[in-house]
Image: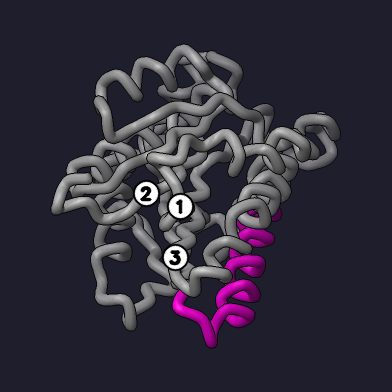
Amino acid sequence: MPSDFKGTALLTGAAGGMGTAIAKALVAAGHRVVLLDRDERKLSALAQTLGADAISLTADITDGKSVELLPERIPEAFRPIDILINNAGHDIGGRKRFDVGSADDWAAIVETNLIGLMRVTRAFLPDMVKRNTGDIVNMGSIAALRIVPDMAPYNASKAGLHMLTEVIRAELAETGIRVIEIMPGLTRTGIILTRYRGDTTKEKAYFDEFKMALDPEDIARSVMFALAQPRHVQVAQMVVLPVNRW
């Protein structure tokens, strides 16, 4: 193991734009990374790019049994998990008034963004508690704090994530585990394109409406800043916005 090794991270939603940026930043900083996503093709390509310090695991975090088995699927060389970054999320079918959108779409958003995150955290937290160390980084959203019409399920999922993070942090206050929430504003990732199910015209119109957005690398730097603090320092919540938003 190299002398500059800083621990192993498990990163969900690794194949997306934000996940890819975070994965690259982790490896550059001396971490090993377990990349987790549903997209096997993109995941494998990312792992190859990152080299020996990354492995890929394909899984759907909404599948309870699959998530329960995740700790056993991780090779010994990538254990234990020191950092859990809950990054997976989507808004497929979103940006519609609540009564107009599909109930199945609304349920799927919550299943991934909140319940899936709960499943993954529950799978790995007990080992952190046993070792009395670790970091949990939950990728939230400014949508947890601001009312955004036509985004009720997404906002609700991120508000739930926010409260879950707050409660877990309180529960673990007497341990050596840090619980971090990063809350980005609009970021140029694939979430908007998937929201509109591949409609690039709608994606462009959305970003044009807001004029300015963050880049995935901006969020990756924020994550790395929080992780780089001394162990007695916990960045409980970080809101990251483009300069033209408030």
Q: Left or right: 61 with respect to 15?
A: right
Amino acid under disc 1? Pro
Q: Left or right: 186 with respect to 88?
A: left
Of helix, strand and loop, which mostly describes the magenta segment? helix
Q: How dense is the environment of label 1, judged by Cα within 10 Å: few (below 14), some, or many (20 and up)?
A: some
Q: Is 24 included in the stretch rendered in magenta?
A: no
Amino acid under disc 2? Thr
Q: Name the residue under label 2.
A: 8
Q: Which mark is residue 68?
A: none
Q: Name the residue under label 1.
A: 80
Residue 146 seen: no
Percent x, y of residue 7: 32, 54
Q: Quadrant of the C terminus?
A: bottom left
Q: Mark 3 points at which residue?
A: 134
Q: How many marks?
A: 3
Distance between the alpha carbons at the discs numbered 2 and 3: 10 Å
Read off the magenta span.
155-176
